[in-house]
Structure formats: structure tokens, C-alpha cells
Image: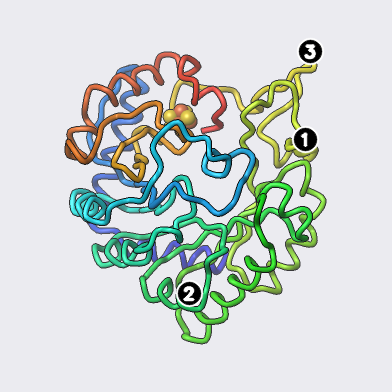
Amino acid sequence: MKNQWTTAKAYLSHLNWDKTSNYFKLLLSFYWSRAVKKPIIWGMPSTLSIEPTTSCNLRCPECPSGLRNFSRPTGMLDKRLFYNIIEQSRKHLTYLHLYFQGEPYLHPQFTDLISYANRAGVFTSTSTNAHFLTPKNVEKTIESGLKQLIVSMDGITQEVYENYRIGGKLAKVQEGLSLLIGTRNAKKRAYPKVILQFLVTGKNEHQIPELKSWAKKMGVDELQLKSTQIYNYENGSSLIPSDPRYSRYVQAKDGKWKLKKEIENKCWRMWQGSVLTWDGKLVPCCFDKDAKHVMGDLKESNLSDIWRGKKYHTFRQQLLQDRKQIEICKNCTE
Ligand code: SF4
């Protein structure tokens, strides 16, 4: 709780009048749009996820980066494009997640990107599989001003860990985490806060008690037990956990599996923020991994024009009318 408050304090310290009023404009336009069933947008994106790269060192089975089966081009974010986006959005951006697909530390200038956003007054966060937390990267990460580092670790023994993180080395993750937390504490720095994210599946749920005591001993700031999105869940999957608290799916009377949460024709994310691929394509959210719904290209247009443009309008309209018609929204708990 204390750590969550420290993170919240960092988040709040980045707010100002422009960012706060923008956020309330978005909130107001979201509720107004739902009431009149017509998309209206009064603010600019308050959060952005930006993809440093699609490259990844692992082969996770539910991830296109890992499976190397993207239908979109793969590559590295150009830092001039990134600077340009930060300049366009720094006035209203309250949260920047430097991650979408891929392993961000494989981008050669990754920590420079964080530093730039940090100097622009933006709260920064990233997600990593923690295989590149070398002494040099740990030092650069702490000095970059990063506020939150989310580490994916889905097993507490190598055997279980590599069930999902195929090609991963648990000892390397643990070593990197220990180095980061130890160095940060020795420097008496409060950030980055380290969140350990455990995707609960049918193959690792038995390790939760052991994981909790390990996380405590390691001194991670927060442990998040997250449910996993499964692509083909209708006929069941060994990845669906038996504990319903960690599952997005339930079995219906006919034996088929379905989403636990009833789908409603709304999605706050479509009013709150956006996701950017490494090559400048703005997509609605992180579920659009293959960029099937490109709202615009930031190499050709500016953020404001795309955010208020026709494609976004049509997409938001569809969400308000019948969300199930959009393939990615069918398997989403938002
Ligand atoms: S998949 Fe659809 S409903 Fe889910 S967050 Fe994305 S746009 Fe919203």
C-alpha cells in the first residue's frame, strides 16, 4: 500500500492544470457520448502506449512477437518520431507506457527515450521480461527517471516459468531484479517502482503462495496477479486457471467457454488514450496487436487530426452501437 502511494505521488506530481482539465474533458465527453449514443471527443489522449520495438528474445505462445507471426512490419522506433510525438502530447499526457509488443530493452536507445519523456514532465512506465537488466542498463534505467518498471514473471521454478516464457531463463530475471532493486536502494532513490506481474494460467496457479513469499523476500514493490487473455478459449484451454478469481472465462451449460464479463457497448479506453506502433501507426488499444485498425499514421498526420479524425469517429460509433461487431472487442474485458 505504501509503495502504491509512492507511485501515486509520482503520478500526481506530474499533473498540472492542462493535464487535469484535459482528463475531465475526456471523462465528460465519454459519458455524454454514451448518453446520446454518438461519439463526441473534447480532449486529447491522456495516456499513450508507445512501442519501442517488435523484437523479442522469447517465444511466448499467446504473443505475436514471441511467435514471430506478425502480419505487420517489424522494426525499431525512430527516436526523432518519438520526440515529435512527445512534443505533440506533453501538454495533456499523464501516463506514458513505453511498451506494446516486443522487449523494449532491445531498442538501442531505450533509456534515452525514457529520459526525454521524463524531462518533458511525463510519468513514464515500461514492461519487460527482465533478461537485459545488466549493471549498465540498471544504472541507465535509474538515471533515466523511469517511474514504474513492470516485470513479467509467470513461474517461480524454471520448469513452470518456461512453460509460457519459452526460451526464458528464470535465474537471469531474478538476478536482474535483485540488481535493480539493490542498486536503487543503495542509491537511496525511490524510482523506478518495481511491479512483478504474474499472468495466472492453469499451469502456474499452484505456485502463487511460493511466489508471494519470494516477492516479499526480494523486496518488489507490488505483486500483480493478472488473468490471461486466451485467443481460442471457446473449447477450453490448459492455460485457463481453475481458480475463477484469475480467469476471464467461465464454462457455460453447453460445455463451451465464454467471457465471464458481459460485454457492454462502451469502452473508456477509446476516449482516454491510444497505442502507437514502432512505425508510427496509431491503433485503438493494446488488443490490436496486428494493427488491423489503424486510425492514422503519425509520420504523415498530427496526433490531434488523427484523434479527432473520421476513422476514430467511426470506430467509437461502432463501439457505442454494437461492440461485438469488432473482432478484437469480442475477447476483451474492458
Ligand atoms: S478491444 Fe475494444 S473494447 Fe477492448 S479496449 Fe480495445 S477497443 Fe476497447
Contact between labelled residues 2 and 1, with CB atoms less than 8 Å apart? no
Q: CA distance from mark 3 to mark 2?
A: 51 Å
**Res 238 label:** 1
Q: Amino acid at mark 3?
A: Asp
> How far is mark 1 from mark 2, CA to CA?
36 Å
Q: Nearer the viewer, residue 332 or 104?
A: 104
Mark sitting earlier along the chain (3/2): 2
Q: Secondary structure at mark 1?
A: loop
Q: Residues within 10 Å of mark 3 (few under 14, many from 20)?
A: few
Residue type pointed to by label 1 = Ser
In the picture provided, is 13 more to the left or to the right than 71? left
Q: Earlier in the sequence, mark 1 or mark 2?
A: 2
Q: Position of residue 109 (x, y in %)?
A: 34, 63
Task: Kindly tell me whether mark 3's CB lies below 8 Å from ligand 1.
Answer: no
Q: Quarter holding the N terminus?
A: bottom right
Work out whether mark 1 precedes mark 3 in sequence or the reverse, and give the earlier one: 1
Q: Is residue 154 left or right of residue 188?
A: right
Does 303 appear above or below 8?
A: above
How packed mark 2 is, by other alpha carbons closer than 10 Å (few <14, some 14-19, many 20 or more), is many
Give the crowd class for mark 1: few <14, some 14-19, many >=20 residues within 10 Å: few
* Residue picked out by circle 3: 254
Q: Which residue is mark 2?
A: 138
- Element on which disc 3 rests: loop
Q: Residue at x 43, y 51 (%)?
A: 99
Q: Position of residue 91 (x, y in %)?
A: 20, 53
Q: Residue at x 68, y 53 (%)?
A: 154
Q: Work out whether 334 lies above or below 7.
A: above
Label 1, label 3: how many angstroms apart (C-alpha)? 19 Å
